[in-house]
Amino acid sequence: MSTQFRWLKRTDYPRVLEIVHDIWEGDDYVPQVFNKWIQEIGSYVRGLFVDNELVGFSRLKILSDKIGWLQGLRVDPREQGKGYGKEIARRMVDHCFSLGLKELWFSTYFDNKSSISIHERLGFTRIGVFTNLYKSVQSPGVVSSSERFRINSLPGRLSGGFWNSWAYYPEGIDSPWQYLPEGLTLTDSKGGDRLILARSIEFGSSLEICTVDSRTDSISADLILFAERLCYNRGHDSLHVMIPQGTSSRVFLENGFAFFEKEDDVYLYWLAR
Ligand SMILES: CC(C)(COP(=O)(O)OP(=O)(O)OC[C@H]1O[C@@H](n2cnc3c(N)ncnc32)[C@H](O)[C@@H]1OP(=O)(O)O)[C@@H](O)C(=O)NCCC(=O)NCCS
């Protein structure tokens, strides 16, 4: 048996489509993003070939000379359970460190036992747990006093990390603004609570609440409704937010957001060398 681990190219797309065809009941997002993943600067998809046949792959996005984001680990369902997922993850990690990266990050879903097992065995630490909340937006939010909200451009300095879609952008990456397309800051002048909003990196129809910055226990319902109004007026059809474990998600749930399945469902992992 011969194996090879190499960067994937546009010509690998048909085989990639075959591999993901039945993953998540055919609902895998890889077909939508594969061409972007292989074209974008600092983004590479690496695949494992067994006897010249692609069996699986994973994507690296380089966020700085030290930090890399991993995602999109996939193995052909007919080839799963044979150790290929582990092999791809291990080779990708080795490759990332050989490039000089010092920190690798990735997120996975709480019930993805094989992904969790593979990465924990490679030494990844679960560094955060988040609740993934969505709201479908079909009409503008009705806000009682819109005068108190200010819309500004993104701050000149971003402290801390932020989410966009299922990708986390930790502090210290290069030009974080590029991961906040059409980004803006929405501030509640009463109390100073602040949201950073941006178009989704992966799925253009979603407006992402990338950071929630609150002086109190919880932001106001009106701030959420104002974000909903912006979402609708800008032509998005849903809002998405990741709430860190230990932070109340009550105000989101009371205003129409729903869990994907349950709270604390997204695990954020980190590995440093
Ligand atoms: C996740 C995925 C890439 C794994 O690929 P794979 O080739 O089947 O994985 P491997 O055979 O290398 O290893 C799976 C490991 O998970 C472990 N595992 C599987 N089910 C498990 C469970 N229910 N509980 C604990 N461990 C489990 C296996 O025991 C094995 O570890 P071991 O060999 O040390 O015992 C593959 O299932 C896949 O493509 N899934 C769909 C997409 C996906 O979920 N991707 C990950 C997103 S982060």
Image (tube, rainbow, N blue to C red):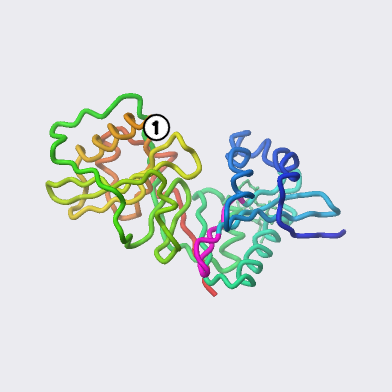
Task: Determine whether, in the image, residue 81 is placed left or right of residue 252.
Answer: right
Residue beneath label 1, please?
Answer: 236
Is residue 155 placed above or below 207 in the rendered structure?
Answer: below
Say how many tags the image has: 1
Q: Quadrant of residue 36?
A: top right
Is residue 101 placed above or below 236 in the rendered structure?
Answer: below
Residue found 74% across the figure and 45% down from its top: 12
Q: What x and y, as percent, mark residue 163?
A: 41, 51
Between 253 and 67, the one nearer to me in the picture: 67
Q: Amino acid at mark 1?
A: His
Check the image and name the residue furthest to the top.
139
Q: Secondary structure at mark 1?
A: loop
Q: What x and y, as percent, mark residue 37?
A: 60, 49
Residue found 53% across the figure and 59% down from its top: 69
Residue found 18% across the figure and 55% down from its top: 215
Task: Determine whether, in the image, residue 273 is placed left or right of residue 251.
Answer: right
Task: Determine whether, in the image, residue 146 is placed left or right of residue 250.
Answer: left
Q: What x and y, as percent, mark residue 61?
A: 56, 57
Between 218 and 230, the one nearer to me in the picture: 230
Q: What x and y, as percent, mark residue 9?
A: 72, 49
Magenta run includes residue 68: yes
- What is the chief secondary structure element of the magenta stretch? strand
Magenta run includes residue 204: no
Between 39 and 164, the one nearer to me in the picture: 39
Is disc 1 surrounded by few (<14), some (14 to 19) or many (20+) residues within 10 Å?
many
Q: Quadrant of the C terminus?
A: bottom right
Residue found 87% across the figure and 59% down from its top: 1
Q: Which residues are magenta?
A: 62-72
Q: Quadrant of residue 144?
A: top left
Q: For the residue with label 1, is its CB less than 8 Å from the closest atom of ligand 1?
A: no
Check the image and name the residue furthest to the bottom.
273
